[in-house]
Image (cartoon, rainbow, N blue to C red):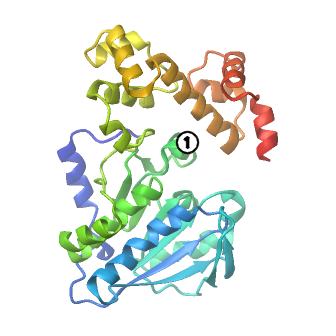
Amino acid sequence: MASNLGLAGDIFALYEKNMTHPATQPRAGKAAFRIGLLCLPDSNLMGLAAALDPFRAANRQAGKPLYEWQFLSPEGGKVELTTGLGFDSAALPFQVSFDLMIVVAGLRLESHSTPALRAWLRQLRSRDIAFCGVEGGAWVLARAGLLHNRRATTHWEDLEAFAQAFDEVEVVPDRFVIDGPAMTTGGAAPCLDLMLHLIRLHHGAEMSGQVANALLYDPAEGAAPQRLIAQARLSQMAPPVAQAIAIMERNLSKPPAISEIAQTVGLSARRLEMLFQDHLDSGPGAFFLKLRLSEARRLAVDTRLGAQAIAERTGFSSPSTLARAFKQGFGVSISQLREKQS
């Protein structure tokens, strides 16, 4: 997996350089920006709302239709989301005529990302239409070949697997990425960040700020990395605690000793222990173990990886060590958890 680019200045220089597609240019005085919102079954309601509601709010703030959209799905008709809610959609048109195609996807990507859908998506490139992957949408776009030789991101839980599956994609752990016509986000909140950013590019910072205020949302910059722990929660902690957590997040597969983490953040192990207890009611060792076990549980539910591979990705010395910690942490074994989830 590619690492974050070096200095912040270099990040933003490359970031701005790649925003050269017509879909990211100012729209003042132009016709409404046309959006196709392609939602696959088993998608996340929050991802869908984050992709659309900022544009609805922009229209309301402007008092006119700055943005137009159409709901699409591979077969048309009702699309059911993971919550059980559904909505009506149009079938995919033979020819695409949007300014931006947003692909929202969630579970069961293998069955929903059909060869026919991937072939349909490839016309976006030939027609120079921008495209955006939300949640599992990045996987769908990558499988269609649309992210080849592009920078892209996906949810932090899937970054390593995404990089392994698509070695032709430069995978970065940013909240959202724009690379020419290709846009990808790391989840629902980063999707909000991206859409607010597009509104700023199209209609200025004041309009984007008004929309953010209407949504009671404080957007992050696109180059900001994804976090396992919410940024708002981290901001309430002592800086060394936030720094220590960031180190833990980056080293789930090869966990350093707590004394090493403490030294890195400029504290004694005892002082770091006290700060963790003050802010999290947990020692750093126990907190780190919970992070690793949480990732092990996700891998058990969302992938078919064996115990050996899960142990390697979460820093356990052997499958048996993982099994003991997993059973103690969750009360069930990996196989029992998978049976319940199936």
List x then y, in percent, for residue 18. 28, 61
List x then y, in percent, for residue 31. 31, 91
**Which quadrant of the structure image shows residue 334?**
top right
Q: Is residue 49 left or right of residue 192?
A: right
Q: Is residue 215 left or right of residue 290?
A: left
Q: Residue at x 33, y 30 (%)?
A: 242
Residue 163 shows in this picture? no
Residue 129 shows in this picture? yes
List x then y, in percent, for residue 238. 28, 28
Q: Residue at x 69, y 37 (%)?
A: 300
Please say if 247 is above or below 81. above
Q: Is residue 49 left or right of residue 278?
A: right
Please say if 141 is above or below 174. below
List x then y, in percent, for residue 200. 24, 70
- Name which residue type carries label 1: Gln
Residue at numbered disc 1: 164
Q: Residue at x 69, y 36 (%)?
A: 305
Q: Residue at x 76, y 28 (%)?
A: 333
Please say if 314 is above or below 2. above
